[in-house]
Amino acid sequence: MEKRGLSLAEIQEVPKESVILLAGPPGAGKSTFCHQMVLNGIAAERPVIFVTTEQSPSGVTSLLRERGMGEPVILSFVDAFAKTVGAEAPEQPDTVDANCEDLNSISMAIARLQQRIGKRDILLAFDSLTSPYLFNKEEVFRFMRLCLLKFASEGNSVLALMDEGCGKEEDLGAMMSVADGIIRMEIKEKSRIINVVKHPKIAPTKIETPMTWSPTIALKTFEPRVMRRIWEARSFTQRVGEALRTEVGDFVNMFWMNLALYGGMLWDPKRVPAMTYEFQKELHLRSIEMMSSAPWRMRLMMKLFMPKSFSKVKDMKKFASYLLKSAEGMGMAIWEYAKEASRKDEHYFRAHESSLGWAFDNVGARLGFHGLGAIAGMLEGFEKEERYWSVVETKCIGMGAPHCEFKAVPHETDELKNFLEAIDSSVVEKIHQRLMDQLTGFLIHGKPLAERPRLGSGVAFNQMFLVTSLPALVSERYRMALRMGGAKVGKEVGEQLMTAGIAGDEVIRRVIDFMECCKVGKISLGETIRIEENCESFGLETGQSSCFFTTGFLNGLFSTVKNQHVREVKCIAAGDPYCEWEVK
Ligand SMILES: [Zn+2]
């Protein structure tokens, strides 16, 4: 298919007076491709405006330097990241701020830089349209026409990136119809495919390049007390004083966890389940390794409870009796081993009142991916023989079943891959909508949040950081998704309360009350916002601010309601006694 003589370099040229849309699923390598196009532009001495929505301008600059950027003639930034998510943004002469929530602010920032540069042939790189789209939906088409197409028609060129699989397919189609050129990228097996679908200068073509990719998990430390309690899960407690979180108890409302998890998933619906599964598996494998050098009590427990192999039903039952109690103790679900349905090397479990699927019945997908990677990791870690375990959800309340069911088998299986890729953006949208309805019901009409008959609403705080701060430490993409998800939820809450006629400070008061009611932490609101025992970071020692969702959420809320920005200046995970946000 490859047209002879056509090189990557030709594709990486953005022709004058045109808008090229670079589309592909998250992780296909669009940003790297875009950086190369910017470097080519700089080499041709073109002025560059870089609109960044997923990381800071300094992050982009250092990536460009790593890839050999010389001295650019002009490289200016529109920083639409920091203000959106509440990240730090040092004042820089070549950078203009904007906010993804407000497309006007982006148009104005581009116009200002264009005027400042004062000449034509500017290359505008927009990485990416995903966040502006997820915040503003259909308005983004108008923005593309009135801002990007107009900018290109004035003797410049535009390269805009967009994630596939976020939002509606027809919306991506509409964006593509606006663009002069479309390049799609995808990953197949071990190669990257660049597909020029339409282009003002190049005939349609496909190029395949090999790629190497190895995910590395750099696991940071937990506070030892927390680690111990996770392994002795029954000792999590609601009772203030006896709990690790002495002020608010160890349990957080599952609503808050789901708000974070599914908020972030709007940005990456396809990959979050697999990321979560793999991450939890790795985490448990590592902690079992750690335990084998742990104090005698821990080793003794492992000896007493752990059979050499989990092939037989009776041995799996032993493991399950330990494991299942711990899951219940953490409020994840009521799990039971389905002994009668299981046989050698094929084990079934039932889960009732799953924290991940409760209140999301019948959304059209299996939702129980959180926790299954952990089980797979434990089975692999505890077995003497080295075997690969797959744990797949087979029935789910998300699909209308009365309870959830999952299956563990000691080999790789396509079922696992299919399960982890089954959730798409329409499902996440549905869940997000249900969460927002519950939330406004609570905040406006005083309706209680969902409760489970036996487990109530609480999950242990470690469940929160398992789906938020920990994977965010490993994956930069996940971190961005959590921040943006938080910002979107915070913005929507603020807007809905204001639409209902509730005014500024009252909105803030109600939302803070709601967070306290969810037992997010102990919150004080003054000149700053302070949260003691914040569930997103309590028990973590990461050496950096790690409350990505909380920060995005507060920033989205305050910027919508009070036109103020929020930034985390202290964090428990960084060693501070509490988390604290400045409000400006
Ligand atoms: Zn924090």
Image: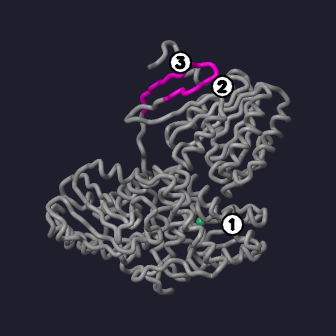
Which label number is shown at residue 14?
A: 2
Q: Position of residue 164 (x, y in %)?
A: 53, 43
Q: Nearer the viewer, residue 454 or 323?
A: 454
Q: CA distance from mark 1 to mark 3?
A: 49 Å
Residue neighbourhood size for the residue with mark 1, other residues' Cα within 10 Å, grouped as few (<14), some (14–19), many (≥20): many
Q: Please, which colouring scheme is shown?
A: one colour
Q: Quadrant of the C terminus?
A: bottom right
| Residue stretch in magenta | 194-211
Of the two numbered discs 1 and 2 in the rendering, the one whose residue sits closer to the viewer: 2
Per the image, the residue denoted by label 3 is 7
Q: Is residue 404 above or below residue 365?
A: below
The answer to whether mark 1 is within 8 Å of ligand 1 is no
Q: CA distance from mark 3 to mark 2?
A: 14 Å
Question: Which secondary structure, mark 1?
Answer: strand
Point 81% across, 44% down: residue: 108
Kind of residue indicated by mark 1 = Trp
Left or right of residue 179, residue 247 in this image: left
- The answer to whether any part of residue 403 appears in the image is yes
Give yes or no for residue 337 being in the magenta stretch.
Answer: no
Kind of residue indicated by mark 2 = Val
Q: Is residue 193 above or below residue 434?
A: above
Ranked by sequence position, the earlier of labels 1 and 2 is 2
Which label number is shown at residue 581?
A: 1
Q: Position of residue 181 (x, y in %)?
A: 62, 28
Q: CA distance from mark 1 to mark 2?
A: 42 Å
Ranked by sequence position, the earlier of labels 1 and 3 is 3
Ranked by sequence position, the earlier of labels 3 and 2 is 3
